[in-house]
């Protein structure tokens, strides 16, 4: 009787939350929050309220609903659209640095191959998942493309596209995911090769990558922002997977120009354009992609770190351009390179896992 009574109370609280959320939020039916799906995700097993991972409804594949969820609390978003289950050190560093510098914000890491049960990934076979999940504000979540694209303009595209015929499939898929994640949940999206140097300001913003050209590697938006809806529609209408960046930075650039009514985005640097701030590249891209090797040059600093601090004093983060740098292997520990400095200071737990 006592157990049944507890179960009834839990169910009653869950229903109250759902009904209250429905009454207070008049835009639930716009797609970013699907009430029937949410209701299915909350179920009772052994007297405990648990999140049921979409497509995996058995009690063994559930997570106890601890902490925030992007449907209710926007945060910092990272994603991995490949099937990799052992995140590379740069990915781990990016997430760790964001978590450390934003301790009061949830950091969500969406992984395609993740099942939803953190305890299933243990050392020594897995290093990244145990390390990242040890941070109280890091939450690793499954990335289900059908669920994510449902109720967005990308749903039809994803059903029809043939990945085997796509030249840049992983990148195109990631481009679509970040737009859908921000539109459904809101928050800040960061590429997994972005090491945070300062706390992030939650606002609607786009970062300039170069002259008159915007980036999609770092984006901040409120949930269901109309600019993102424009981008999702454009993604499908002007889709061309054979052109690098067509669905990524080029898509953001052409839509921002349309949004601001200009062909010269640089005139809006450090200014707002219809509620979207266009921030200069030095805040997140202090070293351009053409000079990416500077991050790995040896002996850039010594025991005195003043020079590095001064060089990057205006930057909120550094984007390491993994699309280029990831093609080569570099020794980090003992190199006195910029990348070693950032690892040591901003992601010390990840730095500790590196081999000499």
Image (spheres, rainbow, N blue to C red):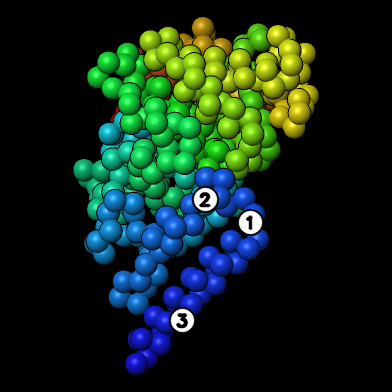
Indicate whether 228 appears above or below 127: above
Q: Which element carries disc 3, helix, strand or loop? A: helix
Q: Which element carries disc 2, helix, strand or loop? A: loop
Which residue matches tag 3? 9
Mark 3 vs mark 2: which is more N-terminal?
Answer: 3
Which residue matches tag 1? 25
Closest to the observer: 31 or 353? Answer: 31
Q: Which element carries disc 1, helix, strand or loop? A: loop
**Residue plotted at (52% across, 28% down):** 232
Q: Can residue 117 be spotted in the picture?
A: yes
Question: In the image, which is nearer the foreground, mark 1 or mark 3?
Answer: 1
Closest to the observer: 275 or 303? Answer: 275
**Which corner quadrant holds the N terminus?**
bottom left
**Which corner quadrant holds the C terminus?**
top left
**Residue plotted at (65% across, 8% down):** 211
**Residue plotted at (27% across, 54% down):** 56
Which residue matches tag 2? 33
Task: Give the spatial CA distance, label 1 vs label 2.
Answer: 10 Å
**Left or right: 99, with 113 as reference point:** right
């Amino acid at each position: 009787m006592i157990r049944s009574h507890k179960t009834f109370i839990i169910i009653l609280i869950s229903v109250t939350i759902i009904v209250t959320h429905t009454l207070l939020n008049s835009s639930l039916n716009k797609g970013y929050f699907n009430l029937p799906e949410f209701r299915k995700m909350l179920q009772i097993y052994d007297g405990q309220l648990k999140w049921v991972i979409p497509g995996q409804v058995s009690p063994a594949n559930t997570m106890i609903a601890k902490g925030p969820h992007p449907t209710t609390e926007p945060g910092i978003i990272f994603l991995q659209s490949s099937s990799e289950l052992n995140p590379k050190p740069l990915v781990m560093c990016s997430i760790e640095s964001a978590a450390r510098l934003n301790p009061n914000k949830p950091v969500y890491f969406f992984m395609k191959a993740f099942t939803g049960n953190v305890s299933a990934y243990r050392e020594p076979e897995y290093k990244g998942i145990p390390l990242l999940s040890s941070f109280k504000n890091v939450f690793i979540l499954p990335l289900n493309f059908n669920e994510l694209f449902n109720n967005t303009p990308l749903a039809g595209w994803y059903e029809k596209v043939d990945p085997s015929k796509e030249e840049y499939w992983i990148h195109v898929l990631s481009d679509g995911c970040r737009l859908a994640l921000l539109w459904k949940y809101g928050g800040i999206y960061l590429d997994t090769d972005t090491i945070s140097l300062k706390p992030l300001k939650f606002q609607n913003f786009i970062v300039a990558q170069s002259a008159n050209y915007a980036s999609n590697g770092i984006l901040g938006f409120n949930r269901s922002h109309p600019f993102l809806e424009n981008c999702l529609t454009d993604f499908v209408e002007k889709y061309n997977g054979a052109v690098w960046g067509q669905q990524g930075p080029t898509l953001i650039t052409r839509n921002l120009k349309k949004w601001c009514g200009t062909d010269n985005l640089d005139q809006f640097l450090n200014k707002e354009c219809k509620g979207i701030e266009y921030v200069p590249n030095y805040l997140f891209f202090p070293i351009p992609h053409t000079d990416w090797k500077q991050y790995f040059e040896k002996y850039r600093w010594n025991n005195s770190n003043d020079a590095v601090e001064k060089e990057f004093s205006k930057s909120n983060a550094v984007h390491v351009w993994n699309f280029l740098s990831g093609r080569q292997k570099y020794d980090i520990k003992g190199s006195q390179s910029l990348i070693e400095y950032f690892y040591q200071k901003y992601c010390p737990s990840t730095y500790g896992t590196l081999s000499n």
